[in-house]
Image: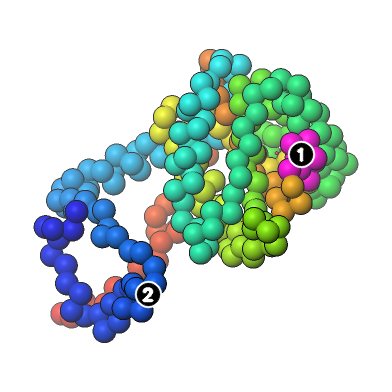
């Protein structure tokens, strides 16, 4: 609710929506909760502390995960903002062992070329060394779920004509981030995995020509004794530039 917020539209010469838009398209009052500053501080800290503990996990156990949790994460991902609100994404959730095996074998075949036949050049492989990755992708078979996020390069209308989609990669990138956050928040682990090239996923998962694999997520619980590389996140001053008005003395 906006009731208690000290807001004003006075400064807007062109309030949104415009009168013409408002007669042609439905709008609703924003559902927004104004919070006291102290509460905003504590929530921001709590959310950071939660997200700062997220790690990419490459040793997932075979412990089952109920589909309802995967559904909840996909629902959350699909709240992401998207170009023209087209939601240009499709999620495919796989627990069928035969399909997981097919994906593992196809991914490993590609990754073997990347690592063993130097499709990834030396400097790329040097950058990856601290992560300790190689072409083996056992987690694709062992984890209870694989979710593949496909980008919808274009939509298909009821009359079969193509509908152009805008900012597809940006939209899917944001949805992927929110999916990862949702999984982490509910206590599941995942890995942002992009077996490269990924075209085999279109074939294996029998997807249409308007879809392209964007990213793949093995999902589950970490194995007992799971290890992750010791990584350091950049400090705020390395990633944030603030441009406030100069202070007068
Ligand atoms: N796709 C490969 C290689 C790889 C590339 C990057 I950039 C990473 O951050 C991690 C791995 C693989 O999955 O092993």
Numbered range of the magenta stretch: 199-207
The quadrant in which the N terminus is found is bottom left
The quadrant in which the C terminus is found is bottom left
Residue, disc 1: 206
Percent position of residue 104, x then y: 76, 29
Left or right of 220? Residue 137 is: right
Percent position of residue 156, x then y: 67, 56
Q: Which residue occupies the foreground of this view, 24 or 50?
A: 24
Q: Is residue 154 positioned above or below 195 on the image? A: below
Badge 1, how many Cα within 10 Å: few under 14, some, many 20+?
A: few
Percent position of residue 169, x then y: 61, 57
Q: Which residue occupies the foreground of this view, 26 or 113?
A: 26
Q: Residue at horizontal 39%, vertical 55%?
A: 236
**What is the secondary structure assignment of the residue under circle 2?**
helix
| Label 1 – label 2 distance at C-alpha | 41 Å
Residue, disc 2: 21
Viewer-side label of 1, 2: 2
Badge 2, how many Cα within 10 Å: few under 14, some, many 20+?
A: few
Q: Residue at horizontal 28%, vertical 77%?
A: 15
Percent position of residue 54, x then y: 46, 35
């Amino acid at each position: 609710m906006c009731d208690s917020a000290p807001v004003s539209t006075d400064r807007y010469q062109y309030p949104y929506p415009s009168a013409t838009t408002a007669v042609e398209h439905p709008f609703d009052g924003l559902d927004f909760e104004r919070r006291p500053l102290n509460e905003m501080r504590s929530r921001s800290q709590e959310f950071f502390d939660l997200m700062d503990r997220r790690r990419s996990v490459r040793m997932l156990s075979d412990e089952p995960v109920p589909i309802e949790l995967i559904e909840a994460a996909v629902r959350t991902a699909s709240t992401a903002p998207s170009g023209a609100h087209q939601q240009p994404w499709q999620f495919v959730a796989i627990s069928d062992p035969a399909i997981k095996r097919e994906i593992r074998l196809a991914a490993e075949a590609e990754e073997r070329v990347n690592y063993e036949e130097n499709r990834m050049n030396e400097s790329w492989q040097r950058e990856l060394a601290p992560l300790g990755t190689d072409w083996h992708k056992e987690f694709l078979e062992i984890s209870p779920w694989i979710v593949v996020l496909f980008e919808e390069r274009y939509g298909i209308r009821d009359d079969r004509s193509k509908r152009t989609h805008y900012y597809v990669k940006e939209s899917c990138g944001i949805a992927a981030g929110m999916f990862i956050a949702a999984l982490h928040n509910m206590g599941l682990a995942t890995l942002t995995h992009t077996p490269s090239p990924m075209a085999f996923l279109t074939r294996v998962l029998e997807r249409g020509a308007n879809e392209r694999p964007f990213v793949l997520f093995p999902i589950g619980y970490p194995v007992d004794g799971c290890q992750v590389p010791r990584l350091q996140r950049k400090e705020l001053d390395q990633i944030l530039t603030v441009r406030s008005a100069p202070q007068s003395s």
